[in-house]
Amino acid sequence: MTPPDLRAIDSVGGVVRELHARGLSRNAIAKEIGRSTSTVSTIAKQLGLSFDRSATRAATSARVVDAEAHRAELVAELQHQIGKLLRRLDGPYISVHPAKDGTAVATRLDRVTPAAARDLASAVASLAASVSRLSSIRTADDGLEGAISLIDSVAAGIKRQAALMESEEGRELLRRAGVVSGDDSERDA
């Protein structure tokens, strides 16, 4: 009895050989015949066929350059956010706390409260750690996947926080927590 792999080669091998001769890539052949790329690789190997990897190398190089540019943009945005947080430490501050009736009471203070300063410092430290990690990634080697994963995670976190801060509920939560004051939108604009 013929093993399953050899039956697949017998029935599909001719098609793989012809598509390979036409210059189709391994992925294009897999898509054309409805098989996985590993199946096409196995069939091609057993037929003595190989695929030109120069296009893959060029695509990988382009991806590395794109990842490095994306990382640089994220580092710049994180540094901007750090600057905004540090500027909050200077000057007047709006402290928001609940009143006995459950409403929010805003009090303008000459300076940031120690608790708010601690929270702002924690946020700055977290962003600075992200900048440090992003800056230390070497994307020109096998760190590419890690770099892309970290960049995507940081970008998703920034998007989530931006969406939260843009929502009325998010602004109210941040005001209640004392993270932003009522006049932050004018100061940060």
Image (cartoon, rainbow, N blue to C red):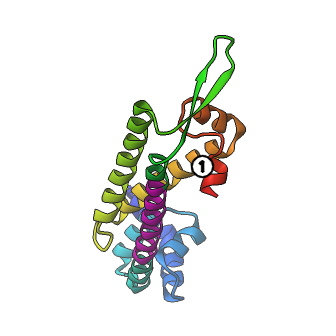
Q: Position of residue 18 (x, y in %)?
A: 53, 83
Instruction: State how many labels appear.
Output: 1
**Residue 150, placed above or below residue 17:** above
For the residue pair 55 and 39, the one nearer the viewer reads as 55
Q: Which residues lie in the magenta part?
A: 63-83
Q: Which amino acid does label 1 sit on?
A: Ala
Whether residue 158 is visible here, answered yes or no, is yes
| Residue 46, quarter of the rendered image | bottom left
Q: Which residue lies furthest to the front in this view?
A: 110
**Which quarter of the image is occupied by the N terminus?**
bottom left
Q: Which residue corresponds to the image point at 62% horizontal and 44% vertical from the top-left?
A: 165
Locate residue 4 relative to residue 109 in the image: left or right. left
List the residue tagged with mark 1: 162
Q: Residue furthest bottom?
A: 22
Q: Position of residue 133 (x, y in %)?
A: 31, 57
Q: Where is residue 42 in the image (x, y as percent from the top left)?
A: 38, 68
Badge 1 marks a residue whose secondary structure is helix
Is 24 one of the magenta-colored residues?
no
Locate residue 170 relative to residue 135 in the image: left or right. right
Whether residue 4 is visible here, answered yes or no, is no
